[in-house]
Each structure stands twice: as C-alpha cells, then as structure tokens.
Amino acid sequence: MSSLTERKARLIVHGDRPYNAEPPLDRLRATYRTPAKDFYVRSHGDLPDLDEATWRLTIDGGTGTMLELSLSDLRARFPETAVMATMQCAGNRRADMRAVAPVSGDPWDAGAIGTAKWTGVRLGDVLREAGVAERLGFHVAFESHDTVEGHPYGASIPLAKAMAPETLLAYAMNGEALLPEHGFPVRAVVPGFAGVRSPKWLRRLSVQDHPSDNPIQAGDYKLYPADVTAETADPAKGHTIDTMPLNAAICEPGSGAALKSGSNRVRGYAVSGDRAVVRVDVSGNGGRSWVQAELEHEADAPFAWTFWSTDLDLPPGGHELAVRAWDEAGQTQPAMPDETWNHKGYLCTCWHRVRVNVT
C-alpha cells in the first residue's frame, strides 16, 4: 500500500493539519468508481492512529440495551452488504462562490466529491440488535475518535435515515480496507447526505430524541441567507445541511485549456442527493444555446453520480463552456453563484463554467 505522503502528492492539498485535499478533475472523471488514493479527503482534526484489533464501537440504543462491538463482531453477527454511493463535501465548488465575495473554508474546486462501492453492515441491523425501533423525531448521534478544537468529532442524522437500507457502517471501499484518511477501521456511509454526516473513525452511536449537540452538528454546516455574516449568524436559524442538492461539473477540458477548432469532447459528472439525474445540458457559448449530453449511470445505484459527455463544435476564439443538470422533478440549477452565495460558501450549485481558448 502506498504511504500517506505518496497519496498526498497525487492530490491538490488545501491544508495539512487538518488534512484536506481533492483530485485533479480529469483524474476524477477517469473512472466511475473513484480509487481510494484519488478520493477527496475532508478532515476536521488530526488523523487518529487506530488499531483494528483493539477498536470497539459502543451503541446506546436508548432502550437500556448497550452493545460493544469489535470489527470481527460486525463481520460475524450481521449480514455484509454493499452500496455504490457518491460522497460529497457541502463545500464542493466553494471556489466559485469565492469569486463573488469572500467566504470561509477551504477553496474547493469541483473535486470534493467521489464515488465508491462501500462494503459493511447496515446501520439499521445494528440498531435493531440494540432494541431500536423507528420513532418519529429521533436521531442517531455519532461520536468519532478525531478531535476538533478539544472536542470529539460528532454529528447526527434522523433515525429514519439511519434505519434506511442504504445507510452503512462501512469497513471497506472498492473492495479494500479503508485507508486511514478515509476512516479506518469503520466509518458511517449515509448516501445522499453531505459528507459531514458520514463520520469516520467511529467510536460511539447514541439514539436520542434530539440532534447531536456537538459543535459540528449544532453550529457548523448551516445554510444562511446572503445577508447573514459570520458575526450575525445564529445557528438556531440556519438550515441544517443533510440531503445534497442537484449539481454538475465540467471535468474535461480544464479551465484555460488550449483546444483545436472543430469537434471537442467535453466530459463531467452530475449528481443529486436523492433524485435521479435525467438530463444534462452543455453549452459552448456561456448558456446562449445548449446541447444534450449522453448520460452514463450504473444500474441499481440510485445514490451514485451520473457521468456525462458530449462533443461541441467550437470555432476559433475564446469560449465559456457551461453545464447544467436536470433531475426527475424537473428542477435545474441556478445560472450564477451570486444567486445562492452565503458566507460559508456551502452548496454552490450554479452552472459550472470553464473558459477555453480555441485556435
């Protein structure tokens, strides 16, 4: 296995402590399943050094039943399953919002996303073993081994999503044990939700009648109106980011690419948290006219991205390529980042634009 240092050298690193990085977009688009070494990394604290043999997960079902499970217990006591799912940071494409006005957070391009086949056990099976039944208004709170400003990382999801068959306690990614930066030995995988709701390096789960009061859940990853600032933001009034919205990006050609006149291949991805992508439009003139792209999606993978590609006939000169997706509800994306700008730079879903030069 390659070293962490070697894997970092493959990525665009936005920060070392905490370690945050994304792949170049052409490499991201090269394979439908993103290799672990090319998968974006989002950390909030230092990477914990955990031993598979001594790792334990505590489950408090809120019913008087407590479970403590080793990795071998998870494998032996629950049916193994797998889900193809896209993971995406809520800050993906933040760089486009930074171009409008300053925002906080790492300047992600469109690479804070990846798709993998995650293998593990259903979180719902483990919760049922702990005596949990579905109850409206309840939540599953996660606590992890990494620390953020002196506190263990923590987040929560609604109990209904935790019991859904696609939500996993995962110990493998694309058929291999999780890499340290991706949550070894066990992480949550919550398809369709922002990556922040799929905590890595798990240590404890608790079923409770309120969301986690951890700062990550209670204070961060909130969507605010454009007139709210860091000084005036009230987390109690911010919208908690769970399900991810419709989005699309151009991965090839890259920004500033020098192309030859005539037919040019344009490729990228489209994704929607819990709806199917049904159409992708691509423009070679900044959105004045559009062509429909061909779509590629794996069967029986409703929580995975859609790849798209098309050929544009580009005459000499400067061109602004643009892409927009449509979902099964007939919804599409805003044209400009100004329309959804917020001081945190979350959920940038405007048309993705790439300027190229054609000779």
Image: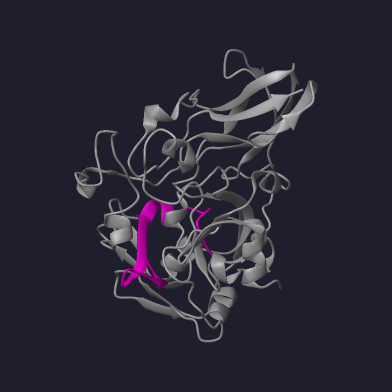
What residue sits 52% from the left and 28% below the top?
Answer: 351
Report if residue 223 lies within the magenta region: no
Please state which of residues 2 and 79 is positioned toward the viewer in this rendering. 2
The image shows residue 26 at horizontal and vertical percentages of: 69, 44
The image shows residue 283 at horizontal and vertical percentages of: 63, 20
Q: How many marks?
A: 0
Report if residue 151 lies within the magenta region: yes
The image shows residue 256 at horizontal and vertical percentages of: 65, 33
Which quadrant of the view contains residue 304?
top right
Magenta: main secondary structure: strand
The image shows residue 142 at horizontal and vertical percentages of: 38, 65
What residue sits 79% from the left and 25% below the top?
Answer: 260
Instruction: Name the image quarter holding the C terminus.
Output: top right
Please state which of residues 119 and 249 is positioned toward the viewer in this rendering. 249
What residue sits 32% from the left and 69% below the top?
Answer: 149
Residue 176 visible in the current orientation: yes
Residue closest to the far bottom: 54
What residue sits 24% from the left and 38% below the top?
Answer: 228
Please state which of residues 96 and 307 is positioned toward the viewer in this rendering. 96
Way the structure is coloured: one colour
Relative to residue 291, is residue 43 drawn left or right?
Answer: left
Task: Magenta stretch: give its range.
Answer: 142-169
Which quadrant of the view contains residue 4?
bottom right
Looking at the image, residue 338 lies above or below residue 71 = above
Instruction: Name the image quarter holding the N terminus.
Output: bottom right
Residue 138 visible in the current orientation: no
Please state which of residues 341 and 117 is positioned toward the viewer in this rendering. 341
